[in-house]
Amino acid sequence: MIPDILAGEKRFGIGRGMYVNSQPTLDRNMTTQQETTQTTDFDTFISSQALPVLTDFWAEWCGPCKMMNPVLKDLAKEWKGRLTIIKVDTEKKPQLANRFQISAIPTMILFKGGQEVHRFQGALPLAQLKRELESKL
């Protein structure tokens, strides 16, 4: 079961290596309790994954973020079984963006066992993205 933070979102790919396209699930003006729940759901999700989790922090208005969509879909297909890819809309989930000190987007954070192991910013072509991640998996 996917936690509430990812519930109702579109998935591209099958099983492991899924690509989750973030849709608004919580109101931007949420209460502290909702923020805590959302953060807890995110932590539970990334900690429970057997595969490393690449998290794309993005926003709808961001051109380079939109450029990364097909790249991430291709990566999810090619690295199926090696990596889980999720997206966090920083406009819809600002408490997560603040928690991870996202100051520019797109920002990609790679988590293993629930812990951040690598981070980078900016849009990358598929080949460069693979090189960036290969040694960290």
Image (cartoon, grey):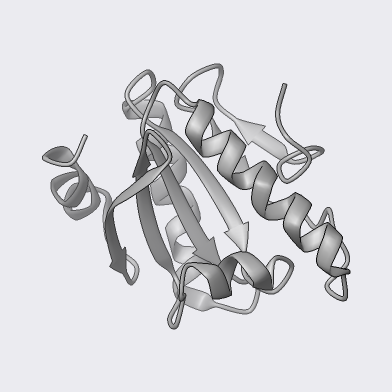
Q: Where is residue 43, by image quadrant?
A: top right
Q: Where is residue 12, by image quadrant?
A: top right
Q: Residue at x 83, y 53 (%)?
A: 25
On screen, residue 19 above or below 64: above
Q: Residue at x 38, y 22 (%)?
A: 80
Q: Position of residue 44 (x, y in %)?
A: 60, 36
Q: Nearer the viewer, residue 15 or 30?
A: 30
Q: Is residue 81 left or right of residue 6?
A: left
Q: Nearer the viewer, residue 102 or 31?
A: 31
Q: Position of residue 28 (x, y in %)?
A: 83, 72
On screen, residue 114 above or below 35: above
For the image shown, how many numbered marks are present on the structure? 0
Q: Is residue 60 left or right of residue 126?
A: right
Q: Is residue 82 left or right of residue 98?
A: left
Q: Residue at x 66, y 54 (%)?
A: 39
Quadrant for the N terminus in the image: top right
Quadrant for the C terminus in the image: top left
Q: Position of residue 72 (x, y in %)?
A: 42, 46
On screen, residue 66 above or below 1: below
Q: In the displayed orientation, state which residue is furthest to the bottom.
A: 103
